[in-house]
Image (spheres, rainbow, N blue to C red):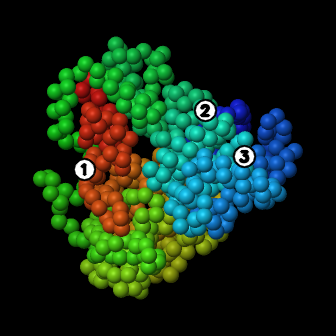
């Protein structure tokens, strides 16, 4: 089976190219072909040219200068101990003189606003700062082409926007050609000058963002503004409200960003009775999932929290990696049986630390942890494993020990008192459920980032857990994979399984979590039902809420905004 087939693509100098598509379709394989030193092993047919010259004619040093590469894991990309060492490392390898290196470091620090970071240890940086330092370390080499593979996958929403703003400056002010692979299209789609949509090892569509948007299925992970507008424009051009738009103008009117979406809403509601819209502020929006089924939460019909057992509790937890800086400070958390509780917050606020303390792989300085009503004093007390609590780490490869996908799943059941036939049936069923049927003989490391995440989760599900701790569970997942994961999580909670996840994925949390909270200043704050949480926030909220807040302040999902627009217009 070919990883890439029939690829023909031309990229002009100075373009900002977005490559999107489902997990495993070949996006990363495609971009790595441009960098022979990291290209996957295999047989390559055809020719790749850079500036009209075959890439095979370039030596490694020249390619290192011409093409820069940024991956998705900031911490794994750090090579040295200090920020300025990181900036100098690549230039030293190219043999540049000290004066040139000092001038370039000074320039890049001014451009990136990193003057105060220059002497910091890299391990003191947040994830967003690390990714920015790595980008600066690549740009100080002055490449003509910058390639990025899901660069914001592990960044919190604010850090991701800062990073993308810097990419936009690099493209528009320096003229650097940018090629970025990304699943999360909300903020990056409108920045692109060309979109390459891939599907099953092939290129499906190529064109400007609005042109491609008219061809893609609106549920394929497009930005929220496009999803909303395409749904409404489809109604208009079908004849329901033919006076509003013409089918030939749809491409030109489609909004690509939140700001354009807000202006699109303003045009649609121009002249609508303000009093009528104001009445919507008191109305309750019914949250629905992707299948149109009402979601359940932890509230009864009167809006009061239903009584469910507390299965996870943290009481006044304190923790710091050194005596001078507390990560958690008098932190309290209650998680009820059968709920999906999402904790959000910036990079470096202590979200992963919180999960580690619940597992007792890190020991708190003070405070108590209770699981199923029992105080946990050490990792031996924590009910980890079969029919207990499991932990999906941010790096799924930390769970991999075998050489094939099938053997990974077999290893999960190895020590359990289950018949061989039952183990085989369980593994076969799990492969189908998570979409890995046909990948049994592949090495786990050969899977895409999203498939690795799914395999790690499948391995844990075989243990039939009652509590699942998840650290950035949607990292590397495309739109359809997220939908599948969300449906699985909801089904698990219906069976009484409790899920606590820390996540940067606001849209996923708004759709599937029962309650959401922020981790700020060492404490879990604002623990509220998801709709109340997101409708009450201005920064940590969904794109749908930003777009429609003036007209439908309680709407937090695209389908809610769409329903509102159709009803009011």
2 vs 3, front mark: 3
Mark found first going from the N terminus, 1 or 3 = 3
User: Secondary structure beneath disc 3?
Assistant: loop
The mark that comes first in sequence, 2 or 1, is 2
Q: Which mark is residue 440?
A: none
Which residue is denoted by mark 1 in the rendering?
532
**Residue 238 position by quadrant:** top left
Query: Crowding near pointer 1: few (<14 within 10 Å), some, many (20+)?
Result: some
Disc 2 crowd, CA 10 A, few/some/many (<14, 14-19, 20+): many
Which label sits on residue 142?
3
Furthest residue to the right? 57
**Relative to residue 279, is residue 163 depicted above or below?**
below
Residue at (29, 64) in percent of width and height: 338
Q: Position of residue 500 (x, y in %)?
A: 36, 65
Nearest the eye: 249 or 179: 179
Mark 2 or mark 3: which comes first in sequence? Answer: 3
Q: Is residue 353 above or below residue 95?
A: below
Residue occupying the point 34% across, 13% down: 243
The single residue placed furthest to the left in the displayed view is 302
Q: Position of residue 163 (x, y in %)?
A: 54, 48
Position in image of residue 337 (x %, y %): 27, 67
Q: Where 159 sits versus 378, above or below?
A: above
Residue carrying label 2: 194
Asked whether disc 2 touches disc 1, contact meaning CB atoms under 8 Å apart, the reply is no
Q: How far is mark 2 from mark 1, CA to CA?
A: 38 Å
In the depicted view, which residue is nearer to us: 116 or 3? 116
Comparing labels 1 and 3, the label whose residue is closer to the camera: 3
Q: Secondary structure at mark 1?
A: helix
Residue 235 falls left or right of residue 29? left
The answer for how far apart the CA atoms under marks 1 and 3 are is 47 Å
């Amino acid at each position: 089976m070919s990883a890439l087939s029939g690829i023909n693509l031309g990229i002009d100098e100075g373009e900002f190219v977005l490559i999107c598509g489902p997990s495993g379709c070949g996006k990363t394989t495609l971009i790595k072909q441009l960098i022979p030193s990291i290209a996957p092993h295999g047989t390559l047919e055809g020719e790749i040219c850079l500036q009209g010259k075959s890439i095979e004619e370039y030596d490694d040093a020249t390619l290192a200068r011409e093409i820069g590469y940024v991956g998705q894991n900031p911490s794994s990309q750090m090579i040295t101990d200090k920020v300025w060492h990181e900036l100098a490392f690549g230039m030293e390898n190219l043999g540049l003189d000290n004066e040139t290196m000092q001038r370039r470091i000074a320039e890049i620090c001014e451009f990136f606003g990193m003057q105060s970071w220059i002497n910091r240890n890299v391990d003191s940086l947040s994830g967003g700062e690390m990714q920015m330092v790595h980008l600066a370390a690549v740009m100080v080499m002055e490449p003509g082409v910058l390639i990025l593979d899901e660069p914001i996958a592990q960044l919190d929403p604010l850090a991701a926007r800062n990073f993308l703003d810097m990419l936009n400056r690099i493209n528009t002010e320096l003229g650097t050609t940018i090629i970025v692979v990304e699943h999360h299209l909300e903020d990056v789609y409108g920045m692109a000058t060309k979109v390459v949509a891939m599907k099953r090892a092939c290129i499906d569509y190529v064109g400007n963002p609005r042109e491609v948007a008219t061809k893609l299925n609106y549920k394929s992970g497009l930005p929220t503004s496009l999803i909303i507008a395409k749904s409404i424009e489809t109604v208009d051009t079908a004849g329901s409200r033919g006076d509003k738009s013409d089918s030939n103008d749809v491409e030109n009117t489609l909004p690509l960003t939140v700001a354009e979406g807000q202006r699109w809403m303003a045009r649609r509601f121009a002249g609508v009775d303000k009093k009528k819209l104001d009445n919507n502020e008191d109305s309750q929006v019914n949250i629905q999932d992707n299948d149109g089924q009402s979601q359940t939460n932890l509230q009864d019909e009167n809006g009061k929290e239903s009584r469910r057992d507390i299965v996870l509790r943290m009481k006044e937890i304190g923790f710091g990696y050194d005596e001078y800086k507390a990560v958690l400070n008098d932190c309290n958390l209650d998680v009820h049986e059968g709920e999906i509780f999402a904790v959000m917050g910036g990079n470096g606020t202590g979200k992963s630390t919180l999960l580690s303390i619940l597992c007792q792989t890190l020991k708190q300085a003070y405070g108590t942890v209770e699981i199923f009503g029992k105080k946990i004093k050490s990792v031996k007390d924590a009910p980890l494993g079969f029919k207990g609590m499991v932990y999906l780490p941010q790096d799924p490869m930390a769970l991999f020990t075998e050489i094939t996908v099938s053997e990974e799943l077999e290893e999960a059941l190895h020590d359990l008192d289950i018949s061989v036939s039952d183990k085989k049936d369980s593994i076969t069923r799990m492969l189908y459920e998570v979409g890995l049927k046909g990948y049994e003989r592949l090495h786990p490391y050969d899977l895409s980032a999203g498939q690795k995440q799914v395999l790690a989760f499948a391995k844990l599900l075989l243990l039939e857990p009652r509590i699942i701790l998840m650290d950035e569970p949607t990292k590397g997942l495309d739109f359809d994979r997220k939908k599948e994961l969300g449906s699985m999580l909801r089904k698990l909670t219906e069976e009484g399984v409790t899920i606590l996840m820390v996540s940067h994925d606001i849209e996923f949390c708004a759709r599937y979590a029962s309650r959401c909270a922020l981790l700020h200043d060492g404490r879990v704050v604002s623990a509220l039902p998801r709709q109340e949480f997101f409708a009450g926030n201005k920064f940590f909220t969904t794109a749908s809420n930003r777009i429609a807040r003036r007209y439908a302040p309680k709407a937090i999902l695209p389908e809610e905004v769409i329903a509102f627009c159709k009803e009011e217009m």
